[in-house]
Image: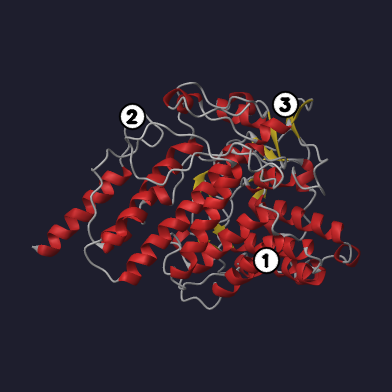
Amino acid sequence: MKNYSHKITLIAILLVVTSSACKKSFLEVIPKGKLIAQSASEYSLLLSNLDLLNTGTANVQVAMGDEVAAVDNYFSASILKTQRSFRWDAVIYEANDDAGETLIPLKNIYLYNKVISEVPNATDGTAQLKLQIEAEARAGRAWTYFMLINYYGKPYNAATATTDPGFPIVEAADVTATKFDRASVQQVYDFIVKDLTTAIPNLTPQVVNRTRMSKAAAEAILGKVYLFMGRYNDALSMLNAAITDMANQATPVRLYDYNVEFATGGVFLPISATSGPASVLLPNNAESLYSKQFANGFTSSYNEIVTTPQTAALFGASDLRLKFYTNATYSTKLPFPVTGVLRKQKGSQTLFGVQVPDLYLLRAECKCRTNDLAGAKADVEALRVKRMPASDAIVPAATANDKMLLLQFILNERIREYAVEGYRWFDMRRLSVDPLFAATTYTHTLYSATGSTTVFQLKPERLVLRFPQKLIDQNPNIVNNP
């Protein structure tokens, strides 16, 4: 009877956590006092909530990257969010819409805050177990804030970060609070770094479950945060630690070798004429160190967002990543009316927590920026040799020996690896305040069915999303972005 009662309690917790109600305030997720957990195991279970894995429609970044183009008449028939984000409009959402970029992340902030504040007083569990659960919640909160500040705050610039408006910092699990003010970009980054540095010593060194935070995952996130801050030596130290700690795990964490996985018996087979290569189930995806995912119809059945011809030209003919692309539409299987564009076929969910290819490319970039060109070349080739025949994976000597050429090669490799998956937008943001790339301009091209083009140019102020009007109306203390 005791075990049965315990199971009912856990089910009740999950039902409350995953339920949603009419939103009336910044963190209106769960009525105060209604989320009940007592034991350490119950608090741990809260961190297995599906909302912490599935961030839903937090996907505006996909259509905003400059590696994509749009094709009519599909584009004109797409939802307003797609059209507006592709044009880099100031207003993305209708006045009464909830933004996908805040809806689930803010629910998750509430949950993380609850675990952080309450698990130290849990009724059972060792002191170390409680510290580990709290550390998971802190690192998860840090990752969530890193996403939020990269949606709604200006790109990190040490010269202006203390005055640039960021995102409200909320540390209490109290949905009755009604006053929220924006912290500065610097304050938010300091908050993220503090959460991660506090968490890392208490996290498990083992990757037990890809949806749960490990020491290696938190080190990787901190490395990425430092890179976005331009602290390349600090970033390199953390990325080195993450790559070391993810090795020799009982749960495999590694790069897939496409030369093997597209051969007989490989994980990407069979290749469907309708949907492309087979998808690897998330729990089995060896390239995922910490799993988060968002809905991405542009890599499954939507036709309106494709790669630009320039992006397609970045791939060599033997690059096996091209197997995830087609020049035909999803429904009719007819070629697009634009030469060179490609539609991506990689499933309806994009992984964007901590991915192994991202770590190698981030570390390669850090090494290049800190003048370890040989190390940078080795890291980018460690990825490329898993994506194409070894003879084609070598970085050309002229590129490998020139810092700027190698850095651009690494950034292009990030596009080759993650086109139409949203990564490019965040790179564009950070590069916009990098003196080496600050003069770069970004454009989008909309192709008509007859081949004519309309070009949109990104304005600096549109590197930052405006808060949705519904959130502003509910929280008038929050000053919106221009």
Q: Earlier in the sequence, mark 1 or mark 3?
A: 1
| Element on which disc 1 rests | helix
Name the residue carrying label 1.
Answer: 236
Q: Residue at x 44, y 37 (%)?
A: 103
Q: Earlier in the sequence, mark 2 or mark 1?
A: 2
Q: Residue at x 51, y 47 (%)?
A: 145
Mark closer to the observer (1, 3): 1
| Element on which disc 2 rests | loop
Residue nearest the observer in this picture, 206 or 345 = 206
Q: Say whether residue 72 is left or right of residue 251.
A: right
Q: Is residue 340 above or below residue 276?
A: above
Q: Quadrant of the C terminus?
A: top right
Q: Amino acid at mark 3?
A: Ala
Name the residue carrying label 3.
Answer: 449
Name the residue carrying label 2.
Answer: 22
Q: Is residue 469 above or below residue 303?
A: above
| Element on which disc 3 rests | loop
Q: Earlier in the sequence, mark 2 or mark 3?
A: 2
Q: Quadrant of the N terminus?
A: bottom left
Q: Is residue 329 above or below residue 411?
A: above
Q: Residues within 10 Å of mark 3 (few under 14, many from 20)?
A: some
- Coloring scheme used: secondary structure
* Separation of residues labelled 2 and 1 (CA atoms): 44 Å
* Separation of residues labelled 1 and 3 (CA atoms): 46 Å
